[in-house]
Each structure stands twice: as structure tokens, then as C-alpha cells.
Amino acid sequence: MKYLLILSLLLTVSLTSCKDKETKEEPQAEMAEEMYDSYGENISSATSLSAIEMEEKYQNLKAGDTVEVSFKTDVTSVCKSKGCWMTLELPGEEDVMVKFRDYGFFVPKDIEEKEAVVRGKAYVTEVSVEEQQHYAEDKGKTEEEIAAIVSPKRTLSFLADGVLIKK
């Protein structure tokens, strides 16, 4: 009987200590996500690629290819009209044009130079002159700058399911 009581006590202590370990680890992940404002689907920053890794992924894409991915980098520009698109910085010369799935959510218009995490589909497109001029107008470019856009452009594109913006 005495051994049964001791075994029961040891089992209770070990289960309690395991439970404590689990609850101590969870808030750390939650605290990391609390550093961000979330838009669209709930996503995590934990498994995001860096901007350098993402640029390598884009180098291997051809028009028509897509890849599901999450990456983290800085916002270079955002739609000043509604927050319906943004561009993200990569180490090379090209930025990534990000739109939001089904036009289902927008981001704030004052997030330039803030860190962002996006999850969704990366792909390469060719953007028409008209669409480039529309984006230039949204950015507040002058009429001369808009008129200077005269040829289609290969663009690194991204369709985001969810976005995190660092607070």
C-alpha cells in the first residue's frame, strides 16, 4: 500500500512538471506574434524565409510557376488610396508586388519601412503599361513619371493569404 501511494505521488509530480513546461513554452510563441498586427488569415512568423532566401526562390521561377511560401522583409511602398497592395524589399533591384487574396483585406497606408511577414503564393508576371501607370498614380507619381511608363515589365508578384506588420 505504501509503495502504491509513493508511486501515485511520483506520477502526479512528474505530470505536473510536464504540464508546467508546456505552458511556459507556449507564451513565448504567442509573445513573438504579439509584436505584429495581423491582417487576413492568422499566420505565424516562425517559419518565414529571409529576404535573401526569397530572392533565390524568385530567381528559379518562370512566368506561370507558383510556390507557397512565407517570408519576412521590409515594406517599400503601399497603396495610398486604400492599402489594397504593397511592395516588399528584396536584396536585388526588384521589389515584390503584393496583393491580397480575393481583395479580402487591406493593410494600413502608413507601413512603409516597417517589417512585414507574408504567407501565400509567389509567382512571376508581366505587368501591362496600363496597370503600371495605375500603380504609379496610386503611389502619387507625377504625370510626367506616369507618362514615361511605355513598356510591359516582368514583375515579382505575391498573392497573400495573411500579413503580419511589426508594431
Image (cartoon, rainbow, N blue to C red):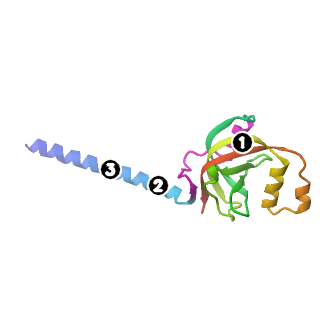
Which residue position is annotated with label 3? Answer: 19
Q: Is residue 38 left or right of residue 7?
A: right
Between 76 and 22, the one nearer to me in the picture: 76
Which residue position is annotated with label 1? Answer: 55
Query: Few, some or many C-alpha atoms within 10 Å of disc 2 (few <14, some 14-19, many ≥20)?
Result: few
Question: Gap between marks 2 and 3, in whole Å?
Answer: 15 Å
The percent coordinates of residue 129 (x first, y second) are 85, 49
Residue 115, compared with residue 69, is above or below; it is: below
The type of residue carrying mark 3 is Lys
What secondary structure is found at the residue carrying circle 3? Answer: helix
Q: Residue at x 89, y 62 (%)?
A: 143
2 and 3 marks in contact (CB < 8 Å):
no
Quadrant of image for the C terminus: bottom right
Question: Gap between marks 1 and 3, in whole Å?
Answer: 41 Å
Which circle marks residue 98 in the picture? none
Q: How many marks?
A: 3
The type of residue carrying mark 2 is Gln
Q: Residue at x 27, y 46 (%)?
A: 14
Magenta span covers which residues?
A: 38-59
Q: Earlier in the sequence, mark 2 or mark 3?
A: 3
Question: Gap between marks 1 and 2, in whole Å?
Answer: 29 Å
Which residue position is annotated with label 2? Answer: 28
Looking at the rendering, which quadrant does residue 62 occupy?
A: top right
What secondary structure is found at the residue carrying circle 1? Answer: helix
Looking at the rendering, which quadrant does residue 1 occupy?
A: top left
Q: Earlier in the sequence, mark 1 or mark 3?
A: 3
**Is residue 48 part of the magenta span, yes or no?**
yes
The type of residue carrying mark 1 is Glu
Residue mark closest to the camera, 1 vs 3: 1
Residue mark closest to the camera, 1 vs 2: 1
